[in-house]
Image (cartoon, rainbow, N blue to C red):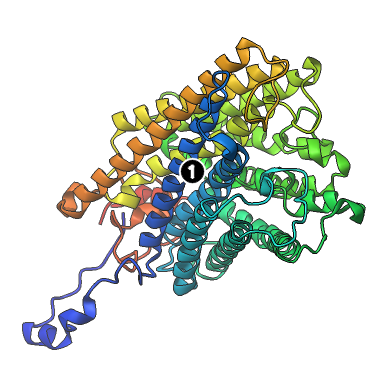
Amino acid sequence: MTATATRPAAPAEVAAVRQPPAAAVTPESPLTTSDHKRLGRYYITAAVLFALVGSVIGVLLELELSAKGIQIVGTSYDRLFSLHATATTVLFVTPLWIGLATYLVPLQIGARRLAFPRLAATAFWTYVGGGILLLASYTFGTPNGMGIVSSVALAPVKGVGRATDLWATSLILITLALVAAAANLFVTILKLRATGMTMARVPNFTWSILALSAAILLSGPVFLAGMLLVFLDQHYAGGLFAASQGNANLVWQHLVWLYGRPDVYLVAVPALGALSDVVATHSHRRLLQPLVAKGAIFATTILAFAVLASNASIERAVVQPTPSLLSAFIVAPIGLTALLWLGTIRPAQLKFHVSLLYVGGFALLLVAAGVNAAVAPSQHLVGGVNGSAWTVGQIHAALIGAPTMAAFAAVYHWSPKIWGKALNQLIGTLVWLCLFGGFAITSAGAWAAGYDGAPWHVDNYTSGATSHYFNYAKLASVGGVLVFLGLLLFLASAAASWAFARHAAPEDLPADPYEASTLEWAAASPPPPDNFESVPEIRSDAPLADLRARPGGGAA
């Protein structure tokens, strides 16, 4: 909804002189584009494709445990477990949020581009190249140990194989890509906001991306340094993480181990921002206490780093039933934000949209994980090197499932802007059933196995195994299949919407189908190369609502 002035048409002869030759307006190819909107769609597609690979591997791992004597992956269980966990965390959740931010942030702040367009393109292709290299590293042989998903440092091996070199190199590339993308978004938000768009007025999603970018810029180089140490340690058998080095294992946990770093909590930060915008838009009200919501998002970011203050108990932090006290405080700002959502919703004004189902899925998975975290200490879970299968349930519910539900809520909410046409709500409901059901069933199977005494990180249930263990694994494999189907269905729906939008008439693609308040809905759907014909005047955090409230306000 923009207020634009109509300019007199130029004479035909002048227009002909000023019109650039056809070759000069040829669109950039996918490999050379620096358009943040195309790159955002590429990020989303690549992240979901990597998640598909991870979900297939996860199903195979659970099938391996579903009956005695089954050999599907053979001696490659540890290798595939490491690949599954790394692909679904490093290659999926965070890059999916980066893709959404790459597309939406310039639109939300009234900018016509990212601060560094070529850096954005470089970051994306570095991420894709690193992801492909990560997958390829497991085909060259067996990387040493279980990598970043183990709390125990890798033992140095002299003359380590090519697989470990490629694995370490791929993670270095992916980290560089995410740091570059975060720096680009950070500068864009600080420097390219439209006139009147103060920091207090930026939408909640953009605010959360500012916080996430700052956190990545702080934590990313630390992980990068850790991976460089791992590469030197493994390639040259340096012994930097050897047991003889005293606290080397604790250093490993703080620098490298996935669940001992702030990253595990940081995926909740963009979720809070995106869902705040989703709830406010479909409630047709401004978010209750928006500055409090921004403060809660900022507090979540700060508390994500509390895990670094842990001592040796870090090995049990985050995913175990006895986390550090500091890391447990993060539930407070998340719970406060959820209360603000409830305070914003008025049933009489609420208009149902499929994205709200994903908001509910996000909340339910976090509640289920919280209840299990409260119950687990009394259940005498398996300890020792292998830990408990209960941990697998926590990871799939709180650390992968909930952020995924939030990201898909954002994707479905902003789909008219991203693809030009809203994704089909019926198919979106089926995708929700698959994803939410898949994560819930997988988590339930793992929680039950843990309470029954099953360990994790094992390729077969042998001594002390009960028939229940195999049934739990079958249940978890069903959940994995559902997640795979949901991701596949989403990709098909997104492709169909994009194909329709490319050949649809402009009147069939409304710029603002929700009567929303934030600035991105002032641009056409999908937006033109420079995003806006003109940017509405910004006097509050709801510029489009202000525009509609003025006499004669409305679509231009």
Q: Is residue 324 left or right of residue 110?
A: right
State the image coordinates of residue 369 (x, y, percent, origin top left): 65, 26
Q: Is residue 11 left or right of residue 5?
A: left
Q: Decide: is 240 above or below 288.
A: below
Position of the C terminus, as image quadrant, is bottom left
| Picture residue at 54% right of the left edge, 46% below the top | 87
Q: Quadrant of residue 337?
A: top right
Using the rendered image of the protein, determine whether residue 399 is visible from the camera's viewpoint.
yes
Q: Decide: is 39 above or below 280.
A: below
| Picture residue at 15% right of the left edge, 75% below the top | 8
Q: Residue furthest left?
A: 12
State the image coordinates of residue 276 (x, y, percent, origin top left): 53, 41
User: Disc count in the image?
Assistant: 1
Q: Is residue 322 left or right of residue 388?
A: right
Q: Is residue 332 left or right of residue 549?
A: right
Disc 1 target residue: 277
| Picture residue at 54% right of the left edge, 25% below the top | 442
Position of the N terminus, as image quadrant, is bottom left
State the image coordinates of residue 394 (x, y, percent, origin top left): 65, 29
| Picture residue at 77% right of the left edge, 23% below the top | 382
Of residues 205 and 459, the one nearer the viewer is 459
Looking at the rendered structure, the secondary structure element under dot 1 is helix
Tell me the amino acid under the disc marked 1.
Answer: Asp
